[in-house]
Image (cartoon, rainbow, N blue to C red):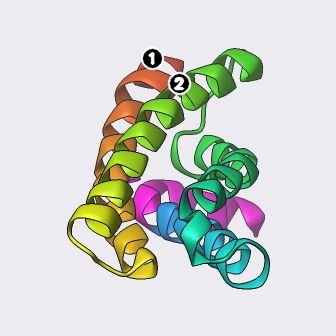
Amino acid sequence: MFKNYRQFWFNISDKVRFLLVGMFNSGVSYLIYAGLLYFILGESNYQIALVLAWIISSVISFTTHRTLVFPVEGNILKQYIKCCTTWVFSYILNAFLLWSFVDKLQINAYIAQIIATAVCAVFNYIMFKLFAFKKNNAVK
């Protein structure tokens, strides 16, 4: 029975799988971000909340992308480093967008992060597909 679910899942386009898994990961990351802002740090510390949410959610995201979107074999540590490299650039893009939206355009920090996340999702898909989880490593 599990094999049928697995077969069904992997017959879905990797773009759709990325979208679904990414929505889950983004939701988890956003809840961490919002929870840190609301309960612990306060809205003025949105960049600190972003860093902490990024660190915490990276392990969850790597695991779900590696197993549910781009199933690969090989050196997990090497793949994780490639993912972290992608995420560093994604983080820089995210932080820049968040700063631009909040400080320059005066958009609410919660809404600004939703917009920035959408932009970074496209960047991450391209980098994961072409760099971190290259197709030549895919499980057959």
Residue 39 visible in the displayed image: yes
Q: Please say whether residue 6 is one of the residues in the magenta stretch.
A: yes
Residue type, mark 2 in image: Thr
- The quadrant holding residue 39 is bottom right
Position of residue 53 measured from the top left corner of the image (x, y, whole percent): 67, 58
Position of residue 110 measured from the top left corner of the image (x, y, whole percent): 46, 79
Position of residue 103 measured from the top left corner of the image (x, y, whole percent): 32, 64
The residue at 36%/56% (across/down) is 99
Residue type, mark 1 in image: Asn
Residue 16 visible in the displayed image: no
Magenta span dominant secondary structure: helix
Pick whichever, 121 or 107, lies toward us. Answer: 107
Pick whichever, 2 or 68, lies toward us. Answer: 68
Which quadrant, please, contains the N terminus? Answer: bottom right
**Residue identified by numbered label 2:** 85
Q: Between marks 2 and 1, how big is the CA–CA gap?
A: 19 Å
Label 1 crowd (10 A; few <14 / some 14-19 / many >=20): few
The residue at 51%/54% (across/down) is 10
Q: Secondary structure at mark 1?
A: helix
Pick whichever, 62 or 105, lies toward us. Answer: 105
Q: How many marks?
A: 2
**Residue identified by numbered label 1:** 136
Q: Secondary structure at mark 2?
A: helix
- The segment highlighted magenta reads 1-19
Pick whichever, 76 or 40, lies toward us. Answer: 40
Q: Does 125 appear above or below 6?
A: above
Which quadrant, please, contains the C terminus? Answer: top right
Disc assigned to residue 107: none
